[in-house]
Image (cartoon, grey):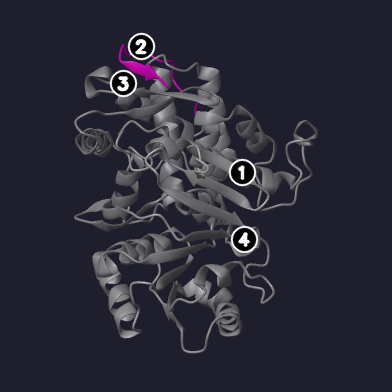
Amino acid sequence: MTVQAAVVEPGVRCDDGGFSLRAPEGTSYRVDITRGLLDPENPLLARYCEGRRVVAFLGPTVERLYGQRLRQYLSSALTPGSWSVAVLPGGEHHKTMATVEEICARAKREGLDRRGVLLAVGGGVTCDLVGFAAAIYSRGVRYIKVNTTLVGQVDVGVGVKTGVNALGTKNMLGAYHPAHASLNDPAFLRTLAPRDVRCGLGEVAKMAVIKDASLFRALEECPDVFLTPRPVPARLADAAPRGVEGYVLRTSMRLMMEELCPNLREHDLARLVDFGHTFGPAIETASGYRVAHGESVAVDMALSSELARVLGLIDAADCERIVRLLAALGLPVHDPQTCTPELMHGALHAAWERRGRRLHLVVPRGIGTASFVDDLDDIPAGALDEALRALARRAAGLPAPLPTAPRSPGATAR
């Protein structure tokens, strides 16, 4: 008798402990959500590390907050002499190939072999650096992400991209390298600075605008989620058994994974999850990273929404709701030093080059739905400048002007 193995269909599957993804091209990985990740009685991290040499890296803030607990956990759970911990410099300025080389050099000094694990404990910068180092060390070793920020948990922690800033460009060098494990503990979010929470909410708002009107409304009702305890709105009582924070966190993670799954390695360069990531990288880089990633995403989303309004792709009321929500979340919607016509037109052209000579600018068509403006020629002369003026007026507390540009004929609904 022939026994046939069960075929796992592509897609994202949810359970109480997190999410499992299987892409159509065969890549599979797991994203776990747990409580008390660094408690000695929680075996999750230890199971993923079991029997392997581990070299852990964390940033200075995580070292201050959790460094001792991490060492105590590893000491109690792993074989003596099989692990070490190193502290990386923090911030986007250190997200470079030089830091990746330092990670690889430390791994080599610690005797990390092909079965070993690089462990990243921190936010997006730390996980991107360690993930890229893992992708190239000995032509690829396992790595584990312990995501301690909201951006990390809803964005970096659920995908497969790694990378560093280079050649004057955000994330210019990188690799697709799925993590051996991506571990998330909502308790980490309680120690975040308010600005870090707001940056994470920028990525949450991104998914709400393009995919989920109910999540958008939840953010409108609870803009201080993760900062101030809130009761569950009555309409979400059945959908949010883990409270507002659990609903926002899990919904954002699920939406992101569902959107990534069919196109995990970006063979199709038109991606809805690039909403907020056309103008944003130029804003972030040109500001010298004064504007944080989540803040640049917010400014980009506001600008893209205003541009959609100017082009007649979204009505003024929905555009107003999007920009108002971003402001209510405590995020900027305009940065006068970087939101110049010259820089923003340059960002459009750079995105057009990067995306295979197609623009694929994501614009909202309403709350919970979005489409693409696929080519530079689909944006009439003056439309972007008008959108920039509208945002500048908003930032000054003035009403936005009425649209004057014609509807773009090239917008593609998705």
Dot 3 corresponds to which residue? 383
Dot 4 corresponds to which residue? 185
Dot 2 corresponds to which residue? 407
> How far from the left and from the top, in percent, is residue 12?
53, 40
Tag 4: residue type? Asp
Question: Quick one: label 3 or label 2, which is nearer the N terminus?
Answer: 3
Q: Residues within 10 Å of mark 4 (few under 14, many from 20)?
A: some
In this view, 243 is above or below 37: above
Q: CA distance from mark 3 to mark 1?
A: 42 Å
Q: CA distance from mark 1 to mark 4?
A: 16 Å
Q: Residue at x 54, y 22 (%)?
A: 318
Q: CA distance from mark 3 to mark 4?
A: 44 Å
Tag 1: residue type? Cys
| Residue 254 vs residue 229, the one in the foreground | 254
Tag 2: residue type? Arg
Q: Nearer the viewer, mark 2 or mark 1?
A: 1
Q: Is residue 413 magenta?
A: yes
- Asked if the residue under mark 1 is in contact with the one under mark 3, i.e. CB atoms within 8 Å, the reply is no
Q: Residue at x 43, y 41 (%)?
A: 23
